[in-house]
Image (cartoon, grey):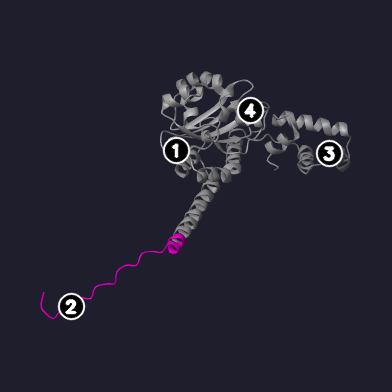
Amino acid sequence: MASGCSIALPPPRQPISAEARRAIDLLLTRWQAVTDLRTLADIVSKDRADRPAGEGLPPSLLADLMDQIRCDVISFEGFDSRRQETWLFQSLPGRGDAMVEDLDPVHWGHYWDCQPCSYPDRTGDLRSIIKTADFYSARQWHSVGTYCDIYRPQGLEHDLMLTLPPAPGPVSGPGRTMRLFFFRGPGPDFSDRDRAVLTLLRPHLLQAYLDAERLRHPVPRLTPRQTDLLHLVAAGHTNTQIARRLGISEATVRTHLENIYSRLQVSSRTAAVTRASLT
């Protein structure tokens, strides 16, 4: 280096203060929250043309959910705890029918002894998003029959479960629910953020299922009189009030309702309103 020449060095970098680091972390958290909300809005507002092969949710919706909540397997299942049968099964990646049939009696054999499995039936709480760790420590879980006979052979360790009521229909009733499961193998459990995401999505997932069912089973057409009557039912009017509004007897109102139930294949006022898409 030539004598007499000097190079100006930049001043040493000052360490980031704890307060500045907290501010940066807060900004990143808020940015992530905005990004998550935009993603969730896209998931629930997307017009999905794909349909499940049978009953269930659009496969593209399940794939989007897997992207949003990291998991190894996602499954949408219909349970009837009174009859001890699984009336709906859909999963990504797909599992063979033979495997599902083999596991079903094992599942129901352990169902009532498995606290998270039977939680919705035991408590009537269909809204809470639950995971295995809410009920068991890892050591306790590893001694439960459901884990030993179903989870461990498949390499599964953690699950997160969302419960939905069944769609209105002639077979709906106590003990009949729909469950959306997220499964993971060994490693980190599902987070509070995962639970919060499903809490936000829950009503939209139920609507997605109902929309898919309407495509599979179009709503039968009602007569103009039946439609008028059902609008009054949806508004919360009693049979007496409906009879007065329509100028007919209460017996005629009951007859109309019976015909509506038969045509829509439901058994209650609420189910008829829901099936006819008046809510």
- The residue beneath circle 1 is 71
- The residue beneath circle 2 is 6
**Cβ atoms under marks 3 and 4 closer than 8 Å:** no
Pinpoint residue 35: horizontal percent, then vertical percent.
48, 54
- The residue beneath circle 3 is 238
- The residue beneath circle 4 is 176
In the rendered image of this protein, does residue 91 appear above or below residue 247? above
Q: Which amino acid does label 3 sit on?
A: Thr
Q: What element carries label 1?
A: loop
Q: Earlier in the sequence, mark 4 or mark 2?
A: 2
Q: Is mark 3 on a helix, strand or loop?
A: loop
Q: What residue type is labelled 4?
A: Arg
Magenta stretch in the rendered image: 1-23
Distance between the alpha carbons at the discs numbered 3 and 1: 48 Å
**Cβ atoms under marks 3 and 1 closer than 8 Å:** no
**Cβ atoms under marks 4 and 2 closer than 8 Å:** no
Name the mark nearer the viewer: 3 or 2.
2
Badge 1, how many Cα within 10 Å: few under 14, some, many 20+?
some
Q: Quadrant of the C terminus?
A: top right
Distance between the alpha carbons at the discs numbered 4 and 1: 26 Å
Distance between the alpha carbons at the discs numbered 4 and 2: 82 Å
Q: Viewer-proximal residue, 219 or 211?
A: 211
Relative horizontal placement of residue 224, taking residue 81 as reference (left or right)? right
Q: Which of marks 3 and 2 is nearer the N terminus?
A: 2
Badge 4, how many Cα within 10 Å: few under 14, some, many 20+?
many
Q: Which amino acid does label 2 sit on?
A: Ser
